[in-house]
Image: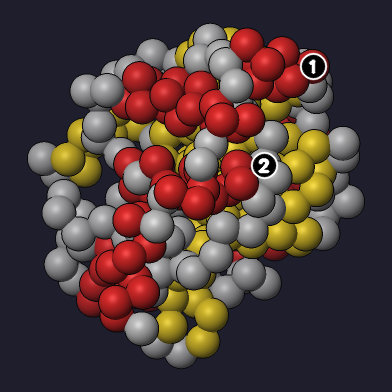
């Protein structure tokens, strides 16, 4: 299977952002991609570091203009798309939601960010956290999604992999440069999975989004990478070989040697709160 990762800037003009995303999806599809990953909040500005409740007006339902346009793009380009939006579930209830649309334009899976950021971002002001690490089947592959800050927690990718994921898709909106690719390579290697990351670029006041989108194999090998800077918009593509997963997990048998029975310290705090 071929996958594509889009690295792009998004401004204030929704129509222009959607037009640009569609062009990059078309480019990825023309290169043979079966599934195209867009960055987190590809359809709007990097709103979550502004303290302005008017930004909540950017939220859309999954039948709003953004996902409607992406469903049309999937059909037109005959490729699946992972599009992450600021989703309105109900009045006053919002999520950071990655939506998988298949090549027929159908919404077949959703993942909601489980770790809203609250240091260099105000995401907890804007949306609620997700509560599940579900996976889904896509063609012959089991795939999962972690969004941006989720990937700072090894438990998140481990849970997705434990639920069967062979590819983890990760949309980002981050200024992080230090250890960004190293983190992603480690998540791929630790879990014996392919990892596809798509980050935005651009400057929003003092906040600079740093690109660095990449596609990593289960050994931590970089299959494709975009420049880590604030201005390079591009599409990267890689072909994923399913047999690499088995080979990697035989050579580095961490899945065989895991001891879930010893890992209760990870959940002890949660148990104490119940």
Q: Residue at x 39, y 14 (%)?
A: 227
Q: Secondary structure at mark 1?
A: helix
Query: Where does the image place residue 24, in percent across and percent down from the top left?
Result: 62, 30
Q: Residue 185 — which label?
A: none
For label 1, the residue is 243
Q: Is residue 118 above or below residue 55?
A: above
Q: Residue 165 — which label?
A: 2
Q: Is residue 258 above or below residue 124?
A: above
Query: Where does the image place residue 189, in percent across and percent down from the top left?
Result: 51, 22
Asked which quadrant contains residue 200, the reply is: top left
Quarter holding the N terminus?
A: top right
Q: Secondary structure at mark 2?
A: loop
- Left or right of residue 196, residue 91 in this image: left
- Left or right of residue 125, residue 214 in this image: right
Q: Is residue 129 above or below residue 252?
A: below
- Residue found at the far bottom of this picture: 91
Query: Where does the image place residue 11, in percent across and percent down from the top left?
Result: 37, 46
Asked which quadrant contains residue 115, the reply is: bottom left
């Amino acid at each position: 299977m071929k996958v594509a990762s889009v690295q792009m800037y998004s401004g204030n003009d929704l129509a222009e952002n959607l037009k640009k995303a569609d062009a990059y999806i078309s480019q990825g599809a023309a290169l043979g991609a079966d599934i195209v990953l867009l960055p987190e909040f590809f359809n709007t500005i990097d709103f979550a570091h502004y303290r302005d409740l008017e930004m909540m007006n950017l939220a859309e339902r999954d039948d709003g203009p953004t996902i409607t346009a992406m469903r049309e793009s999937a059909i037109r380009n005959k490729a699946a798309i992972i599009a992450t939006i600021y989703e309105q579930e109900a009045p006053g209830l919002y999520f950071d939601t990655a939506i998988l649309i298949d090549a027929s334009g159908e919404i077949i899976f959703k993942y909601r960010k489980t770790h809203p950021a609250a240091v260099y971002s105000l995401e907890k002001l804007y949306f609620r956290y997700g509560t599940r690490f579900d996976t889904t089947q896509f063609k012959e592959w089991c795939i999962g999604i972690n969004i941006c800050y989720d990937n700072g927690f090894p438990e998140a990718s481990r849970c997705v992999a434990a639920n069967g994921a062979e590819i983890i898709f990760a949309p980002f909106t981050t200024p992080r440069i230090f250890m960004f690719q190293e983190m992603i390579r480690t998540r791929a290697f630790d879990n014996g999975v392919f990892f596809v990351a798509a980050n935005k670029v651009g400057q929003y006041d003092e906040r600079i989004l740093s690109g660095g989108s990449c596609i990593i194999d289960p050994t931590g090998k970089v299959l494709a990478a975009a420049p880590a800077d604030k201005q390079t918009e591009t599409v990267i593509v890689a072909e994923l070989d399913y047999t690499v997963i088995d080979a990697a997990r035989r050579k580095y048998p961490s899945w065989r040697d895991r001891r879930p029975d010893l890992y209760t310290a990870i959940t002890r705090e949660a148990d104490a709160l119940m």
